[in-house]
Amino acid sequence: MVSEVLDFECDGLLFSPIFHEESLFFLDEYKKKNKPVAMIDSDIKDKIDHYYIGQDAFKSGYLAGRLISFAVKNKRNVLIVKIAKEIDNTSVYLQRIKGFYTFFEEHPELTNFSFSEITIKNPDVNLLNLEMFENINSIFVPNSRTYVVAQFLEKQNIKGIRIIGYDLLKENIAYLNSGIIDFLINQKPEEQGYLGVNYLYKKIILQENLDGSHFIPLDIIVKENYM
C-alpha cells in the first residue's frame, strides 16, 4: 500500500498518521516528492514540512483534567485507562496524558486526587477485571475507546464513576446517553477532513502561503447538548 501511494503522481497529500512507525517510514520517503502535505488528527512534528489540522492534544488532556476536578471535594482515585497497541509511540496519546497530569501539577490545591494507570493492548472488555476498578471514582480514557470501559462497568453494574473520553463514536454516544459516560471531547473529524482538502486547494490552486497549524476548538459533549 505504501509503495502504491509513493508511486502515485499527485500534487498534494492529505494524511492521517494512525500507525506511528509506519507513518515515519512513509513520510521519510514522501518528502522526496517535495509536495504540500496536510496532516490531520495526529501531528508528527519535524519529519516533513506540513500543515496540521486537529486538536492541541496537550490542551485537550489538560481540559480532561479540569473536567475530572469539577465539583469534587472528597478523596478521589483517578484511573487512566490506556487502550492502544502503540502507546509509547503515539505522540497524541502521550500529549493528552501529559496535559492531564499537568493540570493537577498546576493546581496543587487539589490534594484530594490520586492517580493510577492500566494498559490493555486491544479494545476487548474481557481484558478488564473488577480489581482494576476497586475504589476508583473517576476514569480518563485518552482515546476513542471509552466505550470499552463503559461496557465493562455496565456489565458489572458499577455506578457513580465519572468517565471522560474522546470522539462521538456511536458506541460512545450510546453510553453518553445512558449516563455511564459523563463527558466526550469531540475532535470534529469531518471538519478536519474538510479543512485539510481546503488547505490543499488554497496551497496548490490558489498558491496561497498557509504554512503552520489550524487547531480545532475543544468541544465538550454531554448528554444534554449532543445533537
Image: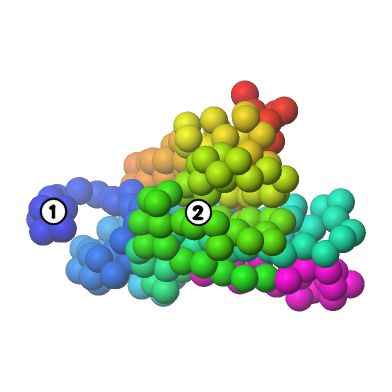
**In this picture, is 226 found above or below 221?**
above
Foreground: 175 or 155? 155
Residue at the (36%, 56%) spot, across then down: 122
The reply to whether the magenta stretch includes residue 44 is no
How far across and how far down the image is residue 217, in percent?
64, 46
Residue type at the position of mark 2 = Asn
Residue at the (48%, 35%) spot, across then down: 171
Could you say which quadrant of the image residue 59 lies in? bottom right
Gap in angstroms between the C-alphas marked 2 and 1: 26 Å
Query: Which element carries disc 2, helix, strand or loop?
Result: loop
N-term mark: 2 or 1 = 1
Q: Is residue 58 visible?
A: no
Q: Number of numbered discs present?
A: 2
Residue at the (46%, 66%) spot, across then down: 119
Residue at the (33%, 49%) spot, across then down: 14
How far across and how far down the image is residue 127, in percent?
41, 57
Q: Which residues are magenta?
A: 92-114
Left or right: 168 in relation to 221 = left
Could you say which quadrant of the image residue 104 lies in? bottom right
Left or right: 79 in relation to 194 = right
How far across and how far down the image is residue 72, in percent?
85, 55
Q: Which residue is mark 2?
A: 143
Q: Which residue is mark 1?
A: 1
Query: Which element carries disc 1, helix, strand or loop?
Result: loop
Q: Quadrant of the C terminus?
A: top right
Q: Is residue 215 visible?
A: yes
Foreground: 94 or 81? 81
Instruction: Give the main secondary structure of the magenta stretch.
Output: helix
Residue type at the position of mark 1 = Met
- Given the current orientation, which residue lies at the most extreme top position? 227
Query: Could you classify mark 2 by the number of other residues whose Cα lies within 10 Å: few (under 14), some (14-19), or many (20 or more)?
Result: some
